[in-house]
Image (cartoon, rainbow, N blue to C red):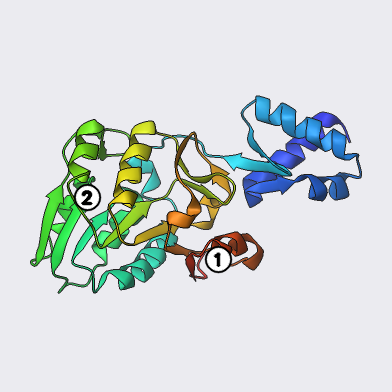
Amino acid sequence: MLKKERQLAILEKVERDGRATTNDMVAEFGVAEDTIRKDFQEMSAKGLVKRIHGGVLRVEKGLLDFDERIVEQASVKQHLAVRAAEFLKDKHVIYIDGGTTNLRLAEHLPQDYMGTVVTNSPTISIELCKYPDIQVMLLGGNLNKTTKIIEGSSAVQQMGSLNFECAVIGVSSLSPENGITFPSYDESMLKQEAIRRSRQVIAIANKEKLGTVGGFYTGDIGVIDILVTNETDENVLAPYVDAGITVITENVQ
């Protein structure tokens, strides 16, 4: 097999599975470890993959438009959001981060839910107006027209005066090796503050987000208390469980 063909096959595996390891690729292609390492190095230099010890990870594709994301995997997002909403019933001061999956969460809170919900998403704040007993606080700051979320130093400063029983964090990329990462620096800083101000952190992530990495670090995976995902492979989930996370799986595609 030519090098170009081999690297294309590696990239297809990474896009499909989220990662590729040196040992697996050596066994699959019957080549030396050094050959695969050179493949990984070249692919990483081109920005096609993220190099880690023993392999490579899928690279997050950057900021995508909210209106495009909202129609992607709509059924999966709804199922995961409904499951995550169960953990909010006894919480009365919560933060719901921006994002399309978290919008589904806002749509599926119990109708009799009573409490204060803080959010950086104008879209989510409008959805929460449908609940008669929810007090809504929308953070102020710069509106990112692509993601439709409020971000920037003003929003971070407001967050610093708040304390939450629970924060539901939107997830862009998550991996045991690289932690919680995002393609936007401002978004990453706001999420860091939300995590610091929360007694409990919930992350909702479809399986395509696991094993990927973005450009800006938010925190180690250990800051997450509950992970709700449709990933069911125990080998993939094992590092998250080992980190002390309660992993809730929904077998929905």
168 or 222, nearer to the observer: 222
Q: State the image coordinates of residue 195 (x, y, percent, origin top left).
A: 34, 51
| Quadrant position of residue 64 | top left
- For label 2, the crowd category at 10 Å Cα-Cα, with few meaning under 14, some 14 to 19 and many 20 or more, is many
2 over 96 or under it: above or below: above
101 or 53, nearer to the observer: 53
Identity, as a three-letter code, of the amino acid under mark 2: Thr
Q: State the image coordinates of residue 107 (x, y, percent, origin top left).
A: 25, 62
Q: Which residue is tagged 2?
A: 119
Instruction: Please report the residue visible at 22 percent of the width from the left and 52 percent of the height from the top.
Output: 124
145 or 211, nearer to the observer: 211
Which label was assigned to residue 87? none
Q: State the image coordinates of residue 207 (x, y, percent, origin top left).
A: 53, 57
Q: Is residue 73 in view from this perspective?
A: no
Q: Which residue is tagged 1?
A: 241
> From the viewer's perspective, is the residue at label 2 or at label 1 nearer?
1
Between the C-alphas of marks 2 and 1, the distance is 28 Å
